[in-house]
Image: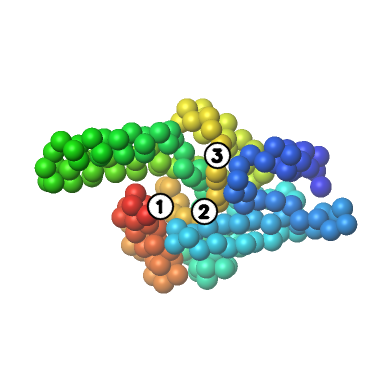
């Protein structure tokens, strides 16, 4: 076990960066046994993976996820490992939206009320869009988890608690042409569920 990975693991367990940790070490009688990783799909299905090696990379997790989802060798490059921070952003926007709704309900007719409610709902959706980061295949997942809250604060200016999850989803550089070429039913199913969740289902049921 490398000293770097050991210190990162200790940092994770001591600071408890968030409330939905999906990466932890498994020990028995004080002896290291492996690493347990929780990875989600966009249909909210959770996969729990176990690795006996400590220096864990994103590629190793992707390989196991591909096996569990029965992907062919050709369709594996279509997907990558992502770390996603959920429920980021100032939650007071929801309260402001509620006040707007209440105010206009007393002043406007029903049609105008529906329009205002729709706009307020969209404002809430925009405010809770998650921060997403695709991991490079060679990246150490412990290092990414440790640094992720700092990335969120730097690029989103959000400094509150960061709730994150690992997701196995579409490769960012994937083209529409690449998607059309695949004939793997398992890959098509994963891509479709992600499109449905991300574009139609996310804002209203996330």
Residue 107 place in picture, x, y as percent: 15, 36
Q: CA distance from mark 1 to mark 3?
A: 16 Å
Image quarter for residue 201? bottom left
Image mark count: 3
Task: Kindly give the residue lying farthest to the right in the view shown.
Answer: 29
Q: Residues within 10 Å of mark 3 (few under 14, many from 20)?
A: many
Is residue 175 in sight in this rendering?
no
Q: Is residue 71 or residue 26 the one in the foreground?
A: 26
Which of the two discs, 2 and 3, labels the residue nearer the N terminus? 3
Are the two marked residues, 2 and 3, in contact with CB atoms closer than 8 angstroms?
no
Q: Which residue is mark 2?
A: 167
Q: Which residue is mark 3?
A: 162
Which of the two discs, 2 and 1, labels the residue nearer the N terminus? 2
**Secondary structure at numbered mark 1:** loop
Name the residue: 67% across, 44% down. 142
Image quarter for residue 136? top right
Q: Is residue 80 or residue 12 the one in the foreground?
A: 12
The answer to whether residue 54 is above or below residue 44 is above
Q: CA distance from mark 2 to mark 1?
A: 15 Å
Q: Which residue is mark 1?
A: 206
Q: Residues within 10 Å of mark 1 (few under 14, many from 20)?
A: few
């Amino acid at each position: 076990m490398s000293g770097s990975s050991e210190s990162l693991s200790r940092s994770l367990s001591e600071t408890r960066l968030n409330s939905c940790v999906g990466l932890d070490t498994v020990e028995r009688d004080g002896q290291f046994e492996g690493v347990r990783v929780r990875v989600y799909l966009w249909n909210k299905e959770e996969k729990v993976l176990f690795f006996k090696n400590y220096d864990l990379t994103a590629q190793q997790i992707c390989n196991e996820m591909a096996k569990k989802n029965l992907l062919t060798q050709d369709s594996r490059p279509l997907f990558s490992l992502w770390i996603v921070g959920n429920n980021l952003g100032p939650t007071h926007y929801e309260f402001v939206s509620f006040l707007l709704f209440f105010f206009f309900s007393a002043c406007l007719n029903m049609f105008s009320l529906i329009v205002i409610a729709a706009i307020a709902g969209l404002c809430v959706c925009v405010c809770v869009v998650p921060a997403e980061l695709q991991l490079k295949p060679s990246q150490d997942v412990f290092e990414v988890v440790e640094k992720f809250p700092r990335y969120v604060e730097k690029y989103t200016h959000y400094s509150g608690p960061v709730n994150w999850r690992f997701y196995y989803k579409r490769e960012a550089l994937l083209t529409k042409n690449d998607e059309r070429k695949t004939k793997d039913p398992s890959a098509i199913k994963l891509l479709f569920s992600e499109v449905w969740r991300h574009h139609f289902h996310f804002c209203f049921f996330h």
